[in-house]
Amino acid sequence: MRIVTWNVLGLTGYPSEVSSSAIGTPGEAANRDHFAGVFAGLGADILALQEGVVHRTAQAIAKRCGRHLATFPSPQAWPGHVLSRFPVVESRTFSHAVDDDSLPPFSRTAGAALLQVSSTQQLWVVCVHLHPGDVTLRAREGKLLRERLEALLPDCNNAVVLGDFNSDVSESVHQHLRELSFVNAMATAGGGLQLTMDTAGIKPWKIDHIYLSPGLGETLTGAAVVRDTGFRTDVPRAPGVWDHSDHLPVRADLAWP
């Protein structure tokens, strides 16, 4: 099984002022065709996306890829999606708007999809996109994420938590996952953590991660950050050159189920 997480920058490409002439804007046929091809090329059985698009657009791309789809709304403007080769049994949204002007936890997106991966095995896919700037809010989000996981795991102890954590692994959200014995795929089988924002014009960061529940961690056979042509560009960026996103996909391969 191959699992991939990727912040796709709203399917605009990066820089969008350059990419738009080639792939159009999200929802247009050229844009759908482009990203359907890119997603298929990742070879993922399960693909989790952050900074996604409206459900109708994601649905059209999922259909092109022959994938089931769960969408997690955003209280603001950054929905998440799970495209899966396996049927979706149910999905739960953790990101909700509030009745005042305050910034809610999971203001980007967070949710879980339960997948039927075989006749006897199910899997929780928990897709998260934590706040990029507010450390205190991220700590609250980490605590809430742990509470949600502790509620999910009694129903099915197979779980992957993945997405854009917008944080160093020293922050509390990662500590919560370690205390639950979740395994960081890149740290364990990918040669260590690597940059997941690493293209010309972008500050480098290691913020996109895949965490596996203890039993799944034992089946991990490899992990990598995808750095192929089209996903990143060396400095200096030549005129007319663009990337699929400002983030890089992270993948994990499992000998499971």
Image (cartoon, rainbow, N blue to C red):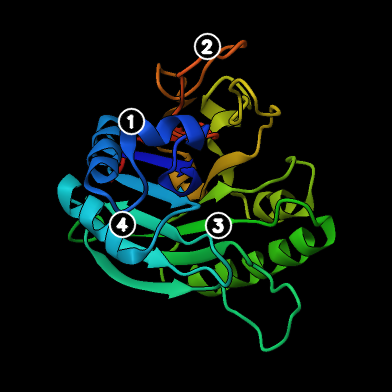
The three-letter code of the residue at mark 3 reads: Val
CA distance for labels 4 and 2: 31 Å
The three-letter code of the residue at mark 1 reads: Ala
Q: Which residue is mark 3?
A: 128
The quarter of the image holding the N terminus is top left
What's the mark number on residue 238?
2
Q: Nearer the viewer, mark 4 or mark 2?
A: 2
Mark 4 neighbour class, 10 Å CA radius: few under 14, some 14 to 19, many 20 or more? many
Q: Nearer the viewer, mark 1 or mark 3?
A: 1
- Do tag 4 and tag 2 residues touch (Cβ < 8 Å)? no
Going 46% across and 29% down the picture, which residue do you hit?
A: 18
Q: Which residue is mark 1?
A: 22
Residue 17 percent coordinates (x, y): 50, 35
Side (left or right) of 203 relative to 70: right
Q: Secondary structure at mark 2?
A: loop
Q: Secondary structure at mark 3?
A: strand
Going 62% across and 11% down the picture, which residue do you hit?
A: 235
- Do tag 3 and tag 2 residues touch (Cβ < 8 Å)? no
- Do tag 1 and tag 4 residues touch (Cβ < 8 Å)? no
CA distance for labels 1 and 4: 19 Å
Query: Mark 3 or mark 4: which comes first in sequence?
Result: 4
Q: Which residue is mark 4?
A: 58
Mark 1 neighbour class, 10 Å CA radius: few under 14, some 14 to 19, many 20 or more? some
Side (left or right) of 107 relative to 140: left
Going 42% across and 32% down the picture, which residue do you hit?
A: 19
Side (left or right) of 254 relative to 246: left
Query: Mark 1 or mark 4: which comes first in sequence?
Result: 1
